[in-house]
Image (tube, grey):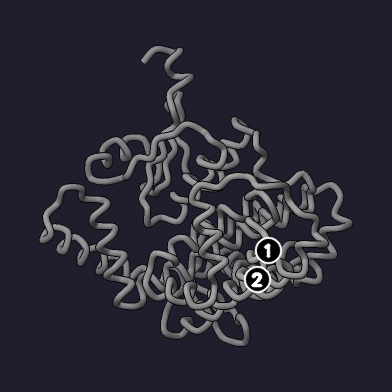
Amino acid sequence: MHNADLMTAPYRIFGVEASPYSVKVRSYFRYKRIPHQWVVRDRTAMPEFQRLAKLPLVPLVVTPQGEALQDSTPILEEMERRHPDPALQPNDATLAFLSALLEEYADEWGNKPMFHYRWTYDDDQRSAAERIARESMPGASADEIASAAEMIRKRMVPRLKLVGSSKATRGVIEASFERQLRILDPHLATRSFLFGGRPTLADFGLFGQLYQCATDPTPARLMQEGARHVLRWIERMLDPHAEGDVEPWTSLEPTLFPLLRDEVGAVFLPWSTANARALERGEASFEVTLGGAPFAQETQKYHAKSLAVLRARLAAVADRSALDPILERAGCLSWLA
């Protein structure tokens, strides 16, 4: 390929439909109108994916210059440097940090109910395993799909422990998901996106997880019964367009603050901090009380790293006179100090 062609060739996104982080990145590319090709990481694309990827994880973005980018949030941050318009984050530093905080909550905690529902209940296991098998094996016979789906199911169910999902923690995870829907649905009843008339980083993070939930039988049923506005927001986020600007915090606060208080401050940050402390002590697992109930899981290095990045992001906010009182009232500030 000639150098001139390199500058005009579209980006390629290697991903799968059942990956929350893949569809998160794809939605961002669609919103920014960045020319790209969605490459399903099926058995035909796997050799190229393995050659380019440093980690065996989707999404993988290959730039027109042949660079390989991985990890959804760093991908969005790099693309934002290259394609700054329309801006992903609000100009207001307070809203920008709150958006980043909610994206972190979605990526690190919101993944738990998504993974939990998908691989805990039989109907969800079979539905997801079959869809994954069909996407990864184009042209396969029905018997091949069935065999592959069963192999996927047997491989994924034991991984529930990696997100802390067990019979003992089921109540905490499912209560968190249902609470999230109860908060988000009235908030999205009167606006197109989380912060108003255009999507921000928080929208893309939450969309990735909740889109997956909307495709699995058990959480989809919960959403259809009590979160129709959330479902309509998911539809918008599949190919989002700016419909206005962000709102001031005064208009967002009545319905968005409960998510910061009841989920981020009461559940996510206590869990994330406990994980980071366990990692510092060299402990293989940890237990923390969330909502009056014990929650135990294996210690995760990546979660501790992302918490450190979030704390550094807060420390970099020059004027926190409006932000700190919000975080304090939501029970978040002490965890981020």
Q: Quadrant of the N terminus?
A: top left
Mark 1 residue type? Thr
Which residue is found at the position 42% from the left and 41% from the top? 60
Point out the image quarter for the C terminus: bottom right
Q: Are marks 2 and 1 in contact (CB under 8 Å)?
A: yes
Question: Compared to 294, does 215 lie above or below?
Answer: above
**Residue positioned 30% across, 71% down in the render:** 125
Q: Amino acid at mark 2?
A: Pro
Question: In the image, is 97 to the left or to the right of 12?
Answer: right
Q: Label 2 to label 1, Cα distance in Å?
A: 7 Å
Residue designated by label 1: 190
Q: Is residue 173 visible?
A: yes
Q: Which residue is at a point 61% across and 70% down the rendered structure image? A: 185
Q: Please tell me which residue lies in front, 34 or 328.
A: 34
230 on left or right of 252: left
Which residue in the structure is indicated by mark 2? 186
Residue 178, compared with residue 55, is above or below; it is: below
Q: Position of residue 311 (x, y in %)?
A: 70, 56
From what the image shows, is residue 268 above or below residue 241?
A: below
Q: Is residue 124 above or below residue 244?
A: below
Q: Secondary structure at mark 2?
A: helix
